[in-house]
Amino acid sequence: MAADQSILIPRVKLGNQGFEVSKLGFGCMGLSGSYNDPVPEDVGISIIKHAFDHGVTFFDTSDLYGANNANENLVGKALKQLPREKVQLATKFGIVKFDYSSGVVINGTPKYVRSCCEASLKRLDVEYIDLYYQHRIDTSVPIEDTMGELKKLVEEGKIKYIGLSEASPDTIRRANAVHPITAIQMEWSLWTRDIEEEIVPLCRELGIGIVPYSPLGRGFFGGRAVVESIPANGFLASIPRFSGENFDKNKKLYWNVEKLAEKHECTPAQLALSWILHQGDDVVPIPGLVVETNALAVVNLIQTGKSLRTIQSVTES
């Protein structure tokens, strides 16, 4: 390994079916745009390899990310340079189209599930997908029908574990009754905590792992947009928290977090990740490009067992 051999990210079981992953995952979406311009392919591959060299083995993508499925293609090429048996690969299906102005088109029919899985396997150039999520729930199709097809894919060995993203408590219960759900992916961070009321307790009742996306507040706690300008035509500009009076108020929140980070001798990004990492061993966040610059420091926080309970109590008040 290119990194210090003594620095390793702990491994945890995600869900109760035996799926083992690195305690810190990597969200690959940003490599293909959305928040910023896509990085060159060779750079994207090097970032994925860098994360792996520092102990990150859990990589998250989707058939939605990037123009013409660019992110899955990129991740697939990166995997060719890594030992496949040591990588836990997650991808998603279900969003046919996403547009800031016209909204989202979702499809959860059995036929669509299978076609998406076959296409992802081909783009990623792998024989199986470790964790396959329904990216968004198609309310026009009974979740039992969608899960029935996913169960068949598990039985055929094309996927190993099933996940849901942005699902309601009722949907989670009904889906889990058809086949065990391994992970629920939801937004969870210092400033997005809605899931703590119902989703988190339900997941723990059913033995389902929790994979928080945007654990840095879509880059906010990494300083993104606080010290930089937001592209007017980018995704962040469409989020109310990043505009007008809301943004001015949230900047004050960032400065408070920065002061706490200084007190604990870490960066705001490391503080935000440490907080979410210490919500439980069943919680595996998937930050994006922050892994490239902060992986070692975050690992050190995990290794020392520093719970940061003082910081947690402050942020909860």
Image (cartoon, grey):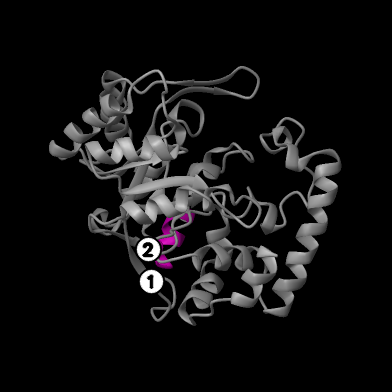
Which residue corresponds to the image point at 36% horizontal and 59% vertical from the top-left? 57
The residue to which callout 1 is attached is: 10
> Where does the image place residue 194, in percent across and percent down from the top left?
58, 47
Tag of residue 80: none
Residue situated in front as seen by the camera: 27 or 81: 27
Magenta span has 249?
no
The span shown in magenta is: 47-56
Does 17 sit left or right of 71 as displayed?
left
Residue 99 to residue 254: above or below = above
Q: Is residue 73 visible?
A: no
> Where does the image place residue 253, in percent across and percent down from the top left?
77, 58
Residue at mark 1 to residue at mark 2: CA–CA distance: 6 Å
Q: Residues within 10 Å of mark 1 (few under 14, many from 20)?
A: some
Q: Amino acid at mark 1?
A: Pro
Magenta span has 50?
yes
Q: Amino acid at mark 2?
A: Ser
Q: Residues within 10 Å of mark 2 (few under 14, many from 20)?
A: many
Query: Seen from this angle, which residue lies furthest left?
Result: 156
Does 64 sit left or right of 126 as displayed?
right
Write down the quadrant of residue 71 in the picture. Answer: top left
> Where does the image place residue 63, in percent across and percent down from the top left?
41, 32
Does 240 sit left or right of 167 as displayed?
right
Write down the quadrant of residue 7 in the picture. Answer: bottom left
The residue to which callout 2 is attached is: 22
> Where does the image place residue 52, in percent across and percent down from the top left?
40, 61
